[in-house]
Image: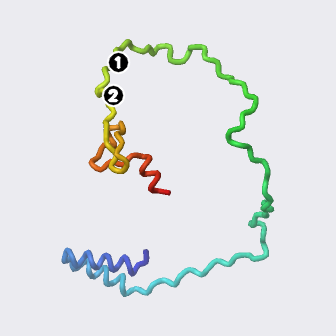
Amino acid sequence: MSKIDEAKKLLKRAMEINDAELISIANKLLEEEPSPPAAPRLVNRKDDSFLSPIMNEDKPTNKTVPVNEVGERVNQFHDDGSDAKDINTPDFEPTARQREPFQQVEQKCQQCGQMRSINPTHKREYYVCDKCIRSKMR
């Protein structure tokens, strides 16, 4: 942040709290001449040691292995029972199921007039069976 920005903030704050001393300090900062910007640093253009050579020649590699390929592997894990010996599963009774299984609902197709048994989720006033819907799509 430059001195001018700092002086502006200081002056704004001084005016808010009505502090004469702070206003004079901010004005002094604004009256000072700003220092010239630093000269840009020259880079030695002859020294290319900082450049990295290009190693990739953009040739496709055929080292890919299919994800589902199964080679000859041996499972090296042996469970000797030493891990978590102190943890025992408590005896429990499973809770009863909260809902009963759904019963199929009979509905009449509005297109062909046949009675169909469907899941109660699909029950509606204007029911059209799957067979009639498929015939409309053709």
SS under mark 2: loop
> Can you give x and y, in whole percent of width and height, for residue 114 in the image?
36, 42
Is 115 placed left or right of 51 in the picture?
A: left
Q: Residues within 10 Å of mark 2 (few under 14, many from 20)?
A: few
Q: Amino acid at mark 2?
A: Pro
Give whichever of discs 2 and 1 has the lower sequence position.
Answer: 1
- Label number found at residue 24: none
Side of 62 where 100 appears, left or right:
left
Q: In this figure, what is the number of numbered marks? A: 2
Residue drawn at the location 31% of the way across and 36% of the way down: 105
- The reply, left or right, for residue 22 in relation to residue 43 is left
Q: Position of residue 84 (x, y in %)?
A: 50, 17
Residue highlighted by disc 1: 94
Whether residue 3 is situated above or below residue 101 in the rendered picture:
below
How much space separates mark 2 and mark 1, taking CA atoms?
18 Å
In the current view of this chain or complex, which residue is farthest to the top? Answer: 91
The relative height of residue 90 versus residue 103 in the rendered view (above or below) is above
Eye-nearest disc, 2 or 1: 2
Image coords of residue 1 (percent x, y) = 43, 74
Along the viewing direction, whichever of 27 and 9 lies nearer the viewer: 9
Q: Amino acid at mark 1?
A: Pro
Q: Is residue 120 left or right of residue 59?
A: left
Query: Could you say which is closer to the camera, residue 8 or residue 56?
Result: 56
Q: Quadrant of residue 18?
A: bottom left
Residue 129, position in %: x, y?
Answer: 39, 46
Residue drawn at (72%, 34%) of the image: 70
The residue located at (74%, 75%) in the rendering is 44
Compared to 138, does 87 lie above or below? above
Which numbered marker is on residue 101? 2
Q: Secondary structure at mark 1?
A: loop
In this view of the protein, which residue sits in the foreground, 28 or 129?
Answer: 129
